[in-house]
Image (cartoon, helix red, strand yellow):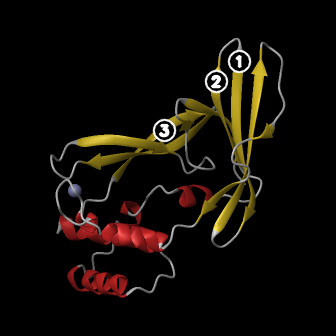
Amino acid sequence: MKRWGMLFALMAVIGLVNVGCDSKKEEAKEKEGTTDNGGNGGGSEEAAFTYTEWNAWNGFGEGSSVTYQLQNTDQMKMWMRYTVTKKEDDKITLKNESKMDMGGKEGEWKAGTPDPKIVKKPAEAAAGGADATCPKCEKKYSDHDAPTWEDGKADVAGNEVATKTMVMKDCKTGDETKGITVSTDVPGWMTKLGQGPVTAFEAK
Ligand SMILES: [Zn+2]
């Protein structure tokens, strides 16, 4: 029962990132799901939550931005800022800028690398990946438990935001490890870039 629930959730995830794919494999999986999982629709929406760069930006409009502080010493302070400049069906264009203050002298916002940064909608590659075999446990990736997400709260640039932290279960040992923490309130969802905290954000 649990396994089918997980598989159903994973299919929902694949469905999310694979809109428009007409492969027979997808149809077969769908059929399997409806027969074995009939009437068990509840809760799948929650389980289907997943982080992809596309999902992380797709919910925000043009003009939304996020700023990360990557360096903060007396000698040097450095920030990086992404701003949504264009939204299309299959790609989102982000303006990528950085600013550096050296020895107390304030710098200017300049184009980062790459600028613009393009976030592409994931397509068929995601479905192929689910069919591949895991070298660790030798099951298909589609037979793995989908990661779960633990709800929490965090202070991001002075705002208390709801967060979700990824919890992954090792497919061989069953050990749980925590992955990234994201907030759907923040454009790009990342609450940090490496060790660099978000120092400002604007959601539109
Ligand atoms: Zn595995």
Amino acid at pointer 2: Gln
Q: Residue at x 47, y 55 (%)?
A: 51
Q: Secondary structure at mark 1?
A: strand
**Residue 6 found in image quarter:** bottom left
Whether ligand 1 has any atom under 8 Å from the Cβ at mark 3 is answered as no
Locate the C terminus by quadrant.
bottom right
How far apart are the alpha carbons under marks 3 and 2?
24 Å
In the displayed structure, 151 sits above or below 109; it is below
User: What residue does disc 3 label?
Assistant: 153
Locate the N terminus by quadrant.
bottom left
User: What residue does disc 1 label?
Assistant: 76
Q: Earlier in the sequence, mark 2 or mark 1?
A: 2
Q: Secondary structure at mark 2?
A: strand
Q: Residue at x 23, y 86 (%)?
A: 35
Q: Nearer the viewer, residue 87 or 126?
A: 126
Q: Mark 3 packing: few (<14 Cα in 10 Å), some, or many (20+)? A: few
